[in-house]
Image (cartoon, rainbow, N blue to C red):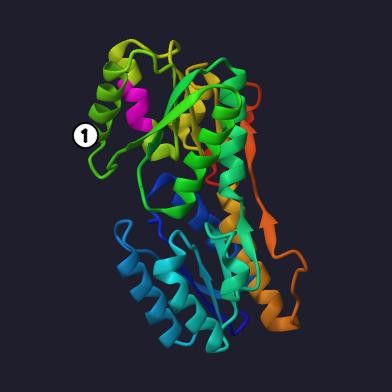
Amino acid sequence: MRPYRFVVVSHGQAADPFWSVVKNGVDAAARDMRVTVEYQAPQTFDMVAMKQLIDAAVASRPDGLVVSIPDPDALGDSIRAAVAAGIPVISMNSGSDVAKELGVLNHVGQTEYEAGYGGGERMAAAGAKKAICVNQEVGNVALDLRCQGFTDAMAAAGASVSVLAVELADPVDAQQRITAALQGDPEVDSILTLGPTGAAPAIAALEAMGKMGEIKLATFDLSPEVLAAIRDGKMLFAIDQQQYLQGYVPIVLLTLYKENLNTLANPVIMTGPGFVTQENAAQVIDLAAAGTR
């Protein structure tokens, strides 16, 4: 066993279907690298609580720190404090645009605006003219960038997008908000959700309204329900950022940095975007069942 203790502080809970795969990557890397890793997250999307977790982690003097950066204004000072204390920091998932200026060694993830833009291009190519972007965490910079990229790509194709804010703590309410948005504007022909927990109420809304297949649907990220919907032709695609790698790679990088001062020249290590479609959904379903996709 190597004598290193790393702390991962993310804005996503390990029980969430997306973040559970991140944690699986963290745990696998901890085993493979023979290091100790603690995974921490606030109980909800709460930047004050996340800042406190980062500060507490820094105070405990770990050998390395991994953080997601959904709100650099709220978390930046805490991350800078970690760097100033001599703790090597790697960011993952969100924060690619600010990682370098905060002093982190590398960022592991995708650039959110470009991922959203790619989704918009695909949606427009499928014939979408008027879409809603369902945002479950307005104020999460990464999610806002996803919607912005999607909006810009759709606009370039002559289509329009409006952002719908929902609270996924109450899935029934989220479904009702999506239903109300569709009923309020019959011209809406497409929906992009920003994660599996956002896709679930969208699927439920479309099925309850009898609109599944009539209104185009796509999402960021994967879950068994999302993959089944793609396989069955109910959903066009999912934008895959390979979150298992976002958990796994930072632990490897920190271990190599501590042991051998290894660093990578490219500050951003891209894990996405990739696209899961009906053509490859069946293969990914088998991998998702193992908790790695």
Can you tell which quarter of the image residue 168 is in? top left
Q: Is residue 244 above or below residue 75?
A: above
Of residues 48 and 203, the one drawn nearer to the viewer in this rendering = 48
Residue under pointer 1: 173
Magenta span: predominant SS is helix
Q: Position of residue 257 (x, y in %)?
A: 69, 78
Residue at image position (63%, 69%) is 100
- Can residue 38 be seen in this snapshot? yes
Of residues 65 and 25, the one drawn nearer to the viewer in this rendering = 65
Q: Is residue 25 above or below residue 221?
A: below
> What residue span does the magenta drawing correspond to?
200-205
Q: Position of residue 292 (x, y in %)?
A: 57, 47
Q: Position of residue 217 (x, y in %)?
A: 46, 23
Does the magenta segment cover residue 217? Answer: no
Quadrant of image for the N terminus: bottom right
Can you tell which quarter of the image residue 268 is in? bottom right
- Amino acid, disc 1: Asp
- Can residue 285 be seen in this snapshot? no
Left or right: 164 as drawn, with respect to 80: left
